[in-house]
Amino acid sequence: MLRKGWRAVGALSVALGLLASSCTRTSDADPGPTPSSGQAGGGTLRLAAPDGVLWAVEALDPQASYESTDWELFRCCLLRTLVSYNGKPTDEGGADVRPDLAEAMPEVSPDGLTWTFRLRRGLRYGPPLEDTEIVAGDIVRALEREATPVAENGYPYFYSVIRGFDEYAAGEAGSISGLETPDQRTLVVRLHEPVTDLAHRFTLAATAPIPPGAAEGHDDGYGRFLVASGPYMIEGSEELDPTVPPEQQQPVAGFVPPTMDGDELATPGSLTLVRNPSWDPATDDLRAALPDRIEIALGGDAGELAAAVEEGRFDMVFGGWATAEQVERYRRDPALADRVFEHRSDILFYMPMNLAEPPFDDVHVRRAVSSAIDKAALVRLLSEPAFAMRGFSVGFAATHVAPDSLEGNLLFGFDPYPHDLDDARAEMRLSAYDRDGDGRCDAAACRAVLALANEAAGRQGRSIQRDLSAIGIDLDLDVEPEDRFFARLRDPTEHVALGVGAGWLRDYPSASTWFPFLFASEQIDPEFGSNLSLLGATPEQLEGWGYSVTSVPSVDERIDRCMGLLGTEQIECWAALDQYLMTDIVPWVPYIEIAHAQIVSERVVGYSFDQFATQPALDRIQLAPE
């Protein structure tokens, strides 16, 4: 699937392995501050992570990791950032940026080029640096580390907008000129161009503070030497000693990565989090910190681990999603129904239509197609092995072009094209391609229409092929492996009329990572392009690619307008653009939003989904009293 970055999502590629054994030790150490959320906390949350989760060298390295599981562990537990999220789903404000280490949201200059953050007073790191205060320079240190080769697999491109960031990364400067700390509690960020989603970028763990000396010499992985600023720390962190030379430092005992023998799991690993005694719940409005202890067994087959959850040996699989069979079985059983949770994951599959290729140059045809497709049937096909093997086995019918988390739920329930063949035929009658008015396309352009389906979506493609035959569109469907599918779909000279199985995942919950990449004309590119409908192509481009159509709609100006706004005004602008695209342009048929489906043990009596990381919010998992 297409993504702006290369962030992995939980169990997209689940390998085979051995079942990891759970470890349920208790700690005699002072558990530290208790939660102030009003919910009863306590107990040990027991998780199992399947093969491939928290294995890489960059695991739990905030500058290097681009994994959703790591991002959840950072947000919920180990690290605080200037601004962050509350660990809840969209309808409970889970996509809204809120102050965290900062005492308030940043001040932004009228030209959008200067952002000023002010830190809360008296915040301290966890052991072994519990006497060290968190200051603005520690965030500068984190961003400087993000500009080094350490972040090769991270996301330094998010911060290139900061003045001097790229020069520092290239070794041409001794500091990042756009980062200023006029005092210990103030960070001023100066940009070389306005970026209205900078606050979202500062929610990411790459900007979490690093105390002096803590990460030095750990370019191959800071995770096992990480000093916490959140409500939890890795067990044994008090034994870390960043004052001795890096080669003499012993990694934290509570994080033991799995080892491999070739392609096979040799030894499972483990990660254990305990309460950080430096964390003060009075300074943290975002984290409930309910469990006293979080234990994660690393390594094992996802299916076997899921069975272990059903048997009560683990409380949930972390980084793995329930299958369609499990979800349906739990839904049907009243004794199990309160142990399955489904939330929108912000992964959306859609069918792009080529606006320059007849008959899809006619908006009435595109609307007819939108009403003709049975999305519920496509959702049912997610249980097919080709999708289930990627963790995509449960979903919701998508009704508009962007996830609700990016639009503040303003379009929740907006569905301009419910499946209705009568509506589809009524719309087709308005097109130039239905000459006898029977609601079916009877022009030559509707015969042998070139369509591509991603190999994993082959059956979905055939379902769409049947749906469109009812309105007179005859698809010539080619099923291609993923790399070939996107290569052809991106290339305007291929004249592909529509594609089945394209998908998009946002990086963080801001529509700035969605609309500009999917609908702006600059994203038409045969090699890397993500505008697959040719929206905004110029007459010269169309002629050069061999199209008889001389113009197509553009939304470039609308995108630019939204990008120039902040806060609620920007969210409303994106929602209006979504409506405009769905009703006036219709470049896509969005058809599935993947669900994050989670099965939990009977010990779990309270559950929350973190919309930011699209993982369970581990700090908000409530356990029954022992």
Image (cartoon, rainbow, N blue to C red):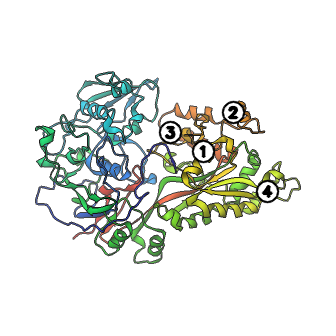
Which numbered mark, 3 or 2, is in the foreground of this view? 2
Of marks 1 and 2, the one in the foreground: 2
Q: Secondary structure at mark 2?
A: helix
Tell me, for residue 426, which label it has, or none: 4
Residue shown at 57%/32% (left/top)?
Answer: 561
**Closer to the eye: label 3 or 1:** 3
Please name whichever residue, 110 or 298, is drawn nearer the observer in this view of the structure. 298
Tell me residue 270's x, y (percent): 24, 59
Q: Going from the N terminus, do you reach mark 4 or mark 1 first?
A: 4
Q: CA distance from mark 1 to mark 2?
A: 26 Å
Identify the amino acid type marked 4.
Ala
User: Which residue bears the numbered disc 2?
Assistant: 541
Residue 152 drawn at (x, y percent): 36, 39
In the image, 407 versus 169, the foreground residue is: 169
Q: Residue furthest right?
A: 436
Depth check: give the residue in front, 389 or 206: 389
Q: Residues within 10 Å of mark 3 (few under 14, many from 20)?
A: many
